[in-house]
Amino acid sequence: MMKQDKYDMIVVGTGFASTFFLSRYLSKAPSSVKVLVLERGHLYPHSERLKERRRESTPYQKLNELSHDTFINENPEKHWEFQAAFGGGSNCWYGCTPRFMPSDFKMKSLYGIASDWPLQYEELEPYYDQVEHSMSISGPDDTPYPRKGSYPQPPHAFNTVDKILKSTYGNLYVSQPTARAKVPVNGRGSCCVSAECSVCPVNAKFTIENSGMGVFEDERVELVYGAKVFAMELQQNAVRKLSYIRDGKERSATADIFALGANAIFNAHILLNSGDASPLTGKGLGEQYGLGARVYLKNMSNVGGGTWVSGNGYMLYDGDHRKNFAACLMESNNAPFLRLEKGKWRDVANFRMIFEDLPDERNYVATTSDLMMPKVHFEGPSAYTLRAVENMKKKLPEILASLPVENIEYSKPYATEAHIMGTARMSQKASDGVVDKHLIHHKYRNLFVLGSSAFTTFSPANPTLTLSALSLYAADNSF
């Protein structure tokens, strides 16, 4: 039972976007403010998740829905990975936190591709720094993107191959910035390099649960679990009421301000169920496109590496090629792998090649006759992205020329990058998107739409740091 009928703000979700937005809002709000947070799932403590991984019994195991049971997927070959639980994606992410490049925000003006974001890197830079300190990010001093401060934790160690590529390419090859702690901090352990990052064995990875941010313990916040939000009441260009199901009963709540912080599928679904007037709501669903490159080495043992992903390569990222094909970010992967050849067990390097994609209206979220069940249509990656894959395969032997390469084998494209984006895109004008640069809906001016659903374009860099910085930016500049 809710404590009251009317709130100053209602927030949907408890993931990165909602938590960072609410943390900044609460830091500025008076002591009298009342906030309702509606979370679809339930708390699944890290200690209990570890029991599940050890195949031990835990009462939490069936408390939250499986992600693939919450929507209809029209393309079963394409997976959309997320968690409907307290902390959202922070429970299952791998903690990779590179910033976007400045060019990612101005694809149209630089390359004639897609659209420019309505805000630029320089506006977001101080908020990147704030999130990096909140998460205690481990990262290098030299980066391909500009930064004014230093990372709060030192970088993780390179492996053998990383060291050679760093020597070859300078700040185009760096230790990956990551929320997997280098040194213990705030009760988190140091990374154990087990590559079991989705549920970190030593709790080194930043999560909402171990964040220490205190957002959901704040006496001004009422957190309700098991609340499946499905629609809002829209009147006179504003949201008046929000509806949800809890314990099998339909309920509602009112507020002055609303913030949707679900993922890009469910933010769009709630808006569509509500009769959102924007023709672009739900359109342009996507994420990055990735595949593996296994590099066999001649008489070189590749050892070391202080974390699961130890290096990021930017050699195929920026440049005029983006007029014709997508940027690619390289990840150096230390997941355990041995060559099955005597004396060559460690003569191998593994890379994940991650490509940006473009929003495409063929890929979208739609409603169904069931108000609780969205449908996802996905036709596939853009030709722009597929051209970049072919270019990478041509260029990679040259890029790795400083290594004794015997052979390169490529995997099939991964079914998912677990980064769902683009269904309520940010734009300067209402005709070009759904929300403005402060993540406020162009039409319904008391509604924020948070998270990567607001991304104008899809950089190859991991989105979590950027969407968290955007939440701070929106809360700082909108009240």
Image (cartoon, rainbow, N blue to C red):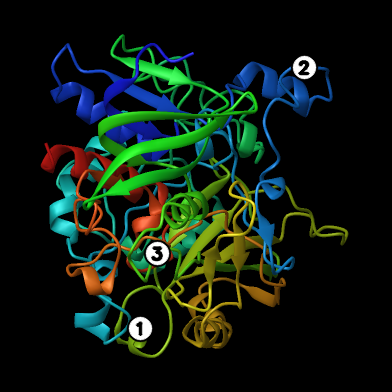
Discs 1/3, front: 3
Label 1: few (<14), some or many (≥20) within 10 Å?
many
- Give the image location of residue 425, x and y in percent: 33, 63
Q: Which residue is mark 3?
A: 281
Check whether the beta carbons of the residues at disc 3 and disc 2 lie within 8 A of each other: no
Discs 3/2, front: 3
Residue 60 is left or right of residue 7, and the answer is right
Q: Which residue is mark 1?
A: 322
Which comes before the other along the chain, label 3 or label 2? 2
Which comes before the other along the chain, label 1 or label 3? 3
Label 2: few (<14), some or many (≥20) within 10 Å?
some
Amino acid at dot 1: Arg
Can residue 301 be seen in this snapshot? no
Rendered view: 240 above or below 223:
below
- Give the image location of residue 265, x and y in percent: 52, 54
- For image coordinates 34% across by 57% down, the residue present is 454
- For image coordinates 70% across by 49% down, the residue present is 68
| Nearest to the observer: residue 425 or residue 246 | 246
